[in-house]
Image (cartoon, helix red, strand yellow):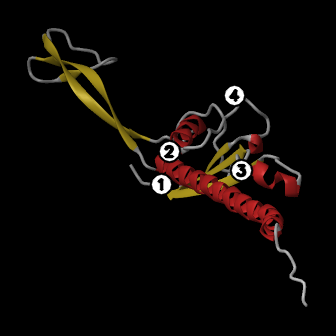
Amino acid sequence: MTRRRRDDGVTTVEFALVLPIFIFLIGIATYFSWMFFVQSQVDRAADRAARYAAVPYTTSTVVQNNVDANGNVYGPGITISSGTTIVGAYSSTQVTRTYHFCEDEVVNKVNRDLSAGSVRLPATTDDPTTYDVQVFDGRTTGTPTGQVIVGDACAKPNGFVKVKVSKNFTNPFSFLIAPFTGSTDQLTVTGWGRARVESE
């Protein structure tokens, strides 16, 4: 007579053996999904910021001009001959084209396009490589080469605009794999954007 072996609890033991592996796989999937999400956001923000700095925008200012009875216009610094009667003044619009090629503007644009967190720009620093955002153009001179420095006025870029965005973040799903890796350190994600400068 053969004695039958009891299998009570086998399913529980199998579940206990498989559960840590299952949690680890889910943790890895969510961890890297979040990392790829942040990477795509940073790349998109850098690309849009480069385009933003490379395309001119229009501004208009109102200019006051004096006009005499013959329709001649007189402005500041122009001597009006004796006997000329000024009959009034009119306003004209002066249209100018300018660029957002300065780090403050670019940082604001990057932060508007990031859906997770924000980047910063220190007020002053001696090492531009520590910035979260760096803005370059096609210049071949300057220190550092071709880079806009904090506090520079917005200007027309030369040839192209390249924007580097570096973002530190702590992955919210790192706790799922921390028991296996032993680390929940911050990661740095870097994105690059490039756009050709459009002429005025």
User: In the figure, 178 relative to 8: above or below?
Assistant: above
Of marks 2 and 1, which one's residue comes earlier in the chain?
Answer: 2
Q: Residues within 10 Å of mark 4 (few under 14, many from 20)?
A: few
* Circle 4/circle 1 CB separation < 8 Å: no
User: What separation in Å lies between label 2 and label 1 (alpha carbons)?
Assistant: 9 Å
Name the residue beneath numbered marker 1.
Answer: 197
- Which SS class for mark 2? loop
Name the residue beneath numbered marker 3.
Answer: 173
User: What separation in Å lies between label 4 and label 1 (alpha carbons)?
Assistant: 27 Å
Name the residue beneath numbered marker 2.
Answer: 156
Q: Nearer the viewer, residue 41 or 174?
A: 174
Nearer the camera: disc 4 or disc 1: 4
Q: Could you say which quadrant of the image residue 103 lies in?
A: top right
Q: Amino acid at mark 4?
A: Ala
**Residue 90, x across and y down, in percent:** 17, 19
- Which SS class for mark 3? loop
Nearer the camera: disc 3 or disc 1: 3
**Residue found farthest to the front:** 1
User: What separation in Å lies between label 3 and label 2 (alpha carbons)?
Assistant: 43 Å
